[in-house]
Every structure is written in C-alpha cells, then in structure tokens.
C-alpha cells in the first residue's frame, strides 16, 4: 500500500473516531447567530459534519487532509507561522468538530462578514489569519499559501451539509450569564484542584495539556483572553472529557485567575474596535 493511501486511511480513521465521539450540541445561540436569525433566516441547521469517507481522492481531498493536519498539529505543519506552544485544536477541540468548542462545522457559510473588532468585512481566510496572529501569537499566512488554502478547504468541507440560509446555533462557545462577583483566589484553588494535572502548577502546560499563561500561551489579543469567553470554554469543556462538571461561578473564577497571569502582548490591539462597542471583559 502506498504512503499516500496509508496516510489517507489513517486520517480518515482519526476523523471518523473524532466525529463518533462528538456529543450532541448542548449550546445556546451566540449573539451573532441570534442576529442572523432575526435578520430573516428561519432555519436552524442540524449538527451534521460530513463523513471522512466523503473526502475526495483528488487535489481538493489533499487540501482537506492538509487542513486537518494544520489544525490538529499546528506546531508541526504550521510552525513557521506560530509563536507559541499551541495548536489550533487546543481551542477548536477535536479538530473543530466539537460543537461546544468553537466548531468549524457550518462556519464557512457565514463568511465574508463584518467583524466589529476589526471594523471591516472579513473573509474566512482573514479570520484564520487573525487567529494565527492573536491566539497563536504568530504571523499571518500569505494569501497564496497552500496551507492557508488547505485550512479554508477543510472548514468548507466540514460546512458542506449546511442548508443555504440556515443559522449555525452551535457557533462559538455556549455563553454564561452570571452576576457572580469574580474571586481570583477561589479561581487559584479551582485551578490547583482541577487544572494542574494537564496544565501544570505553573500554567506552562504538560504532555496532557497546553500552557494557559506565559510566553508560550495565547496573547492578550486572543478571544480566550476575555474572561467571559474563557469561562464559557472552561464550563463546557474542562476538565477535558469532563465538561459541565464545574459550576458557572468556578468557571468564572478560574478564568479570572488564568487571565490575570502574564502572557504575550498584541501590538496591533490599538486598532481594535475602531467604531466602539469593545466588550467590557477585554483585557486592554
């Protein structure tokens, strides 16, 4: 059996195992999803990522497979563009297939779109590069990059079962609504009790989990640097495999503690939200 065939079989098996382990969506619609629904769309799509068996055996199939590798092993396949120790799949869990963790399923149908933080219309490729610059503390991929094209192809493939004009109710991360007064000291206690096994007592990561602060983690310009976003992610997904086992208050406290620790700056933050409406939990 040739190497390309073996690689295709292995990747297909990995994707199939990932899809089969994805739980049913347990999410609330994001603000953007609600806005799309009220704008005239009346169809809520079902969470139905395509089967790995549908990946074509042509150039597009090669792009899709490379895009998957870029997501799950960014350190290896995208290392030229990464400035920390993270992989895209550290936030987009299960290769972007987890509906509780910023899933890629259906996302390509939403672009191009206006992004308030950038103050302009953005393509899917623009949004991917935003993540490389902010969450990966790196640099954007060239617009003609084979690897950027591959990530777009992978996300488009994951979105191909979306009916035209439908909403994406699992978009982003399930939100938390709380009036809890944040307590970073309790957050430290929660971290020490439930997070150190994977992320280390110093937050610098282990073989089981990525760094959550320090120079090898996400920058202050990343979405995860917002306490509300980090708390929602923690609530729905952490500890890994035991999501929904921390309380809302615990999630908020531990997110406050984690995001109070030092992390890389993002110099272009001075250009964010040029038209206002900056979220209150933005750390700058």
Image (tube, rainbow, N blue to C red):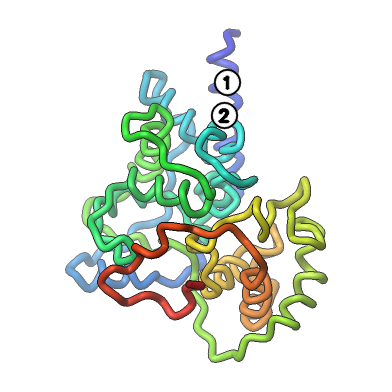
Where disc 2 sits, the SS reads helix
Q: Which mark is residue 271?
A: none
Residue, disc 1 = 7
Does residue 241 lie above or below 138 as drawn? below
Residue 40 position in % (x across, y down): 17, 68
Q: Residues within 10 Å of mark 1 (few under 14, many from 20)?
A: few
Does residue 280 lie above or below 58 as drawn? below
Q: Of residues 107 and 181, which is closer to you in this image?
A: 181
Residue 261 position in % (x across, y down): 67, 68
Q: Of residues 14 and 125, which is closer to you in this image?
A: 125
Specify whether 183 is left or right of 122. right
> In the rendered view of the protein, which quadrant contains the N terminus?
top right
- At a point 54% along the width and 60% down the height, the residue shown is 265
Q: Residue furthest top?
A: 1
User: Tags 2 and 1 in contact by the CB under 8 Å rule?
Assistant: yes
- At a point 54% along the width and 87% down the height, the residue shown is 178
Q: Residue furthest left?
A: 40
- At a point 48% along the width and 58% down the height, the residue shown is 266
Q: CA distance from mark 2 to mark 1?
A: 6 Å
Q: Residues within 10 Å of mark 2 (few under 14, many from 20)?
A: some
Where disc 1 sits, the SS reads helix
Residue, disc 2 = 11
Q: Is residue 33 visible?
A: no
| Numbered disc total | 2
Q: Quadrant of residue 189?
A: bottom right
Q: Is residue 253 visible?
A: yes
- At a point 65% along the width and 53% down the height, the residue shown is 215
Q: Quadrant of residue 8?
A: top right
Q: Of residues 28 and 42, which is closer to you in this image?
A: 28
Specify whether 92 is left or right of 201. left
Residue 119 position in % (x across, y down): 26, 63
């Amino acid at each position: 059996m040739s190497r390309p065939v073996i690689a295709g079989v292995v990747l297909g098996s990995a994707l199939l195992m990932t899809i089969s382990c994805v739980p049913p969506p347990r999410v609330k619609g994001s603000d953007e999803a609600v806005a799309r629904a009220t704008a005239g769309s009346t169809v809520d799509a079902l969470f139905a990522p395509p089967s790995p068996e549908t990946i074509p055996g042509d150039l597009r199939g090669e792009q899709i497979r490379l895009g998957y590798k870029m997501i799950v092993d960014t350190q290896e396949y995208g290392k030229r563009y990464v400035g920390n120790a993270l992989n895209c799949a550290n936030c987009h869990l299960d290769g972007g297939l987890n509906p509780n963790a910023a899933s890629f399923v259906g996302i390509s149908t939403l672009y191009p779109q206006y992004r308030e933080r950038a103050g302009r219309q953005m393509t899917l490729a623009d949004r991917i590069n935003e993540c490389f610059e902010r969450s990966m503390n790196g640099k954007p991929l060239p617009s003609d990059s084979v690897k950027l094209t591959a990530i777009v192809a992978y996300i488009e493939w994951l979105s191909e079962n979306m009916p035209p004009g439908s909403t994406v109710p699992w978009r982003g991360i399930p939100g938390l609504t709380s009036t809890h007064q944040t307590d970073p000291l309790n957050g430290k206690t929660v971290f020490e009790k439930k997070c150190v096994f994977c992320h280390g007592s110093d937050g610098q990561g282990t073989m089981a989990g990525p760094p959550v602060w320090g120079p090898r983690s996400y920058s202050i310009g990343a979405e995860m640097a917002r306490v509300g976003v980090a708390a929602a992610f923690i609530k729905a997904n952490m500890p890994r495999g035991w999501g929904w086992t921390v309380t809302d208050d615990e999630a908020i406290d531990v997110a406050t503690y984690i995001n109070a620790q030092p992390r890389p700056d993002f110099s272009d933050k001075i250009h964010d939200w040029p038209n206002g409406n900056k979220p209150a939990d933005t750390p700058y």
